[in-house]
Amino acid sequence: MTLRQLHYTSAPPGPDGSGFRFTSVSDGVGPEVLRLAEPVLGYEPPRDAPLRPAEAELAEFPVAFAHTRLPDGSSLVSRTVYTGVDYTGRYGNFHAHAVHLAPGEFLPHPERPAEQLRPIEVWESPSWRQDAPVGQAPPDLPFLKQGFTFGREVLCRFAAERAEQLAPFLADVRALFADPPGPQLVLVERDPRAVAHWVALATGALPARHAAELTFTTYTRRPYRCGQSIVGIRPDAEFSFGPVELQHHYRVRHGLGGPSSPVAGDPWAELAAAVWLAGRVELFARAAGPEGGFATGRLAALALAAGVPVGAAAARAAAEWACARPTDPAFAGSPGRQDEFWDGLTAGLLAADAVGPDGLRRLAGALHTAGLGARAVAALTATALRAAVLDPSDELAAPALPADPEARRELADSLAPALRARIGDPATDPARLLGLVELAGRLGVDPQAPAGSLAERLTATLTGADPQRADRTRRLLDAPGGAELRAAVLDRLNDLAREDDPAPLAAVVGSRLRFDRAELTDRPHLAAVRRAGRDHAGLSGTRLLTALLNDALSDGTAPSAGAGGDRPEGDPLLLRTVFRLGWPDSPPTVLDAREVLRVCRHPRFPPDLLPRSGLGTGLARAALGAAADDPHAASLAGELLAGFADRGLPPRERAALEALHLAGELRAGRVDRGFTRLALELALRAAPLEAAVATRLTGALAYLLLGGHSGLARGRAPGVAEVLLLDEVGTLARSGDPAALAAYRTRAAGPVLRRDLANDSRYPAACFVAWSSFPDITPGWERTRTDLLDQVLRPTLRALPADARDRIGSLVAATPFRPPGDLAWSTLWADWHRGRGPGLVGRLFGRARPGPPRRGANELTPDQDDRGKR
């Protein structure tokens, strides 16, 4: 291959004319190339250059060395220098020597032709000519010799001098190859040699493909006309340095301290700068991969292994790259060299302190899998584990531990204090605690934490919502060395079943733990939970209770009549656990509760089982929550009062059950005198009394007070006073209790009592006596009795024949109870009969009522009453 050359200068007249023209061109360079190349090869001296330089001053003029991509895809590598006077003796002449490379061609290496030179490597090559043959083709040029005016040492020294600007410059260079590419990079230097140094630093760090594509010029006076990616100018160039140009149109790096563009952070640029500053230029070539891109991770890994300090982002990239590609050819070498590489990389990563425990663990795992870097694996694992143990946010995934016993022992010794501190800290998250305990077990480190505290926290992971954590806990408890911890966790589960809601445990314990019989024998609550969730899944209520208690009786874990209270089988709270398993969300029905009581009377159970079971409230809710018309609720209340005797029931619930039971007794007539006072006292002690129980109690009280079990309606009553229980009515009247009085009023106004009033003279007589007694004793009673006399008794008597009314009056006059005030019962009857007594004003039996009426608050006027009758 022969390089195609071009010479351009001001020359005497010839076939192509005179003045500036191509004076010598290699064969094969067509006119189109010359047309495209001519604008690139021009030269203007700096504005402060001497107009008539002496021969010695010509060397001070800047050299325009450039690599330029032409519009047709080909490129020029050119060197243009100022030569002073032309053939006419006029100043302003220059000479450009260039080589033309077709698309895909490159500068061949003088010693290794198959390889290529980067254009900047022929800066000041001895192959460049400052004069040109005129009128003849240039001689054959197989290659350009390398320039030796600066080498590795010179570039490293220049990098050190410009250390602060190096990373920003390299970031701008990398941006040139982004998609879309970044703006042109303008370098401001007085000496184009410095620009060449910058370009050499860039091409030395760039991947080979990008280095070959990088275009530049070391000098121009008019940068706006240049198309190269990197443009070198002097401070006096025709460039405005305006804010918009600095921020958006260009990236400007001013080597003399003038205005520059903002610095753009770039991990690759910072890394490449660190490599240059460390003088490890060979790492760029080693980092070059077949993908040809910016392999930041590979370069960072090589740099760390070589002892080059890098930034946090580069360190993380190195760890990621090495973890994903531990067998990368760039890392390969002899076994000894490989270990040296991984040891160096590990030391660099740990020194950078930028890779978290998870990243270190993953790298250790990748190396362990690939069979690489045994020492590095141990160091990475130890550091990752130490960091993970100390970091409260790390869940501590299971790591690959060193295989070497000595390394594992050293690791255990170094981690033991931190492990014990974290395991013993109550604030440690349960999920993280699981990893800590697992790690302690694998390293053979005694946690030295109280077993009860540790078990409580591990129980939370076993019964929690995360099945993976639960499975890890199970494996930990099933491990050969976890027997003591397992026993403590089972004890804790038994305590939870006894003290808290056992139903949620039933869903997880049976499926997440395997037990043997001995483990359950001493833990009856846990045994019940496991059977409810596994052996008797699907059963509920009394069927589950019966099944679980039968299981307990058969295996000896039931509360036994002959067992001591301190023994597990003598624990009456087992019944409570079984009860909660049967009815986890709502109380049992009344019939279910009665069945529970029946089961508890099993002869093998102790007689005080119910009071000691803690079921008082739960069973009481079944009775007290029953509907007001439930026929079995009152009987259940009586059974509970008998079963719990004088203990095991809270005071309010006991009073409410007594009220419910009394309601049933009132309905049945099985009460002694004083029942009204008792009913009202129970309602007060049980406040707030359940609505259904209050309805039962007041309704039953009204029922009995109004002759519900007297037999009066059937003519078997022994007398008026006994029928209406006047002393009990007095108690009701004195109480003024609104609910009881309302129930009494409702019952008295109902159809049953109206029928009795019309069918038997003794009943209206008795009602008149009761409702005329205790006047004005309480406002509530006064309103109630007046309302009953006016709106219930008086309309009923109007419909009776005269002889029936007279008979009622005789019965009233004969009552043995003392009437209110000084009047006789006959007088009270006559006054009321004639409309002068308390109650509805108006006329009775069609006769005018003498004297002014006495009206209650709700009474009607006489006219209203007449209209009502009509």
Image: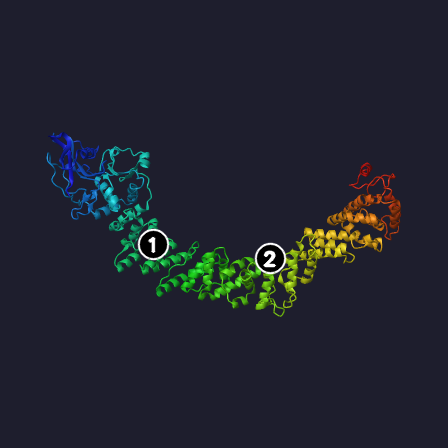
The quarter of the picture where residue 864 lies is top right
Crowding at dot 1, Cα within 10 Å, few <14 / some 14-19 / many 20+, comes out as: some
Residue 645 visible, this angle: no
Residue 845 visible, this angle: yes
Q: Is residue 13 above or below residue 521?
A: above
Task: Say whether marks 2 and 1 touch (CB < 8 Å).
Answer: no
Q: Quadrant of the N terminus?
A: top left
Q: Position of residue 382 (x, y in %)?
A: 37, 59
User: Toward the viewer: 568 or 543?
Assistant: 543
Residue that mark 2 sits on: 583
- Element class at badge 1: helix
State the separation of the CA atoms marked 2 and 1: 55 Å
Q: Quadrant of the C terminus?
A: top right
Upstream in the sequence, badge 2 or badge 1?
1
Q: Give the left or right position of residue 523, taking residue 256 as reference.
A: right
Q: Position of residue 857 (x, y in %)?
A: 78, 41
- Element class at badge 2: loop
Q: Amino acid at mark 2?
A: Trp
Disc assigned to residue 158: none
Q: Position of residue 555 (x, y in %)?
A: 57, 68
Q: Amino acid at mark 1?
A: Cys
Disc assigned to residue 323: 1
Q: Give the left or right position of residue 701, taking residue 216 as reference.
A: right
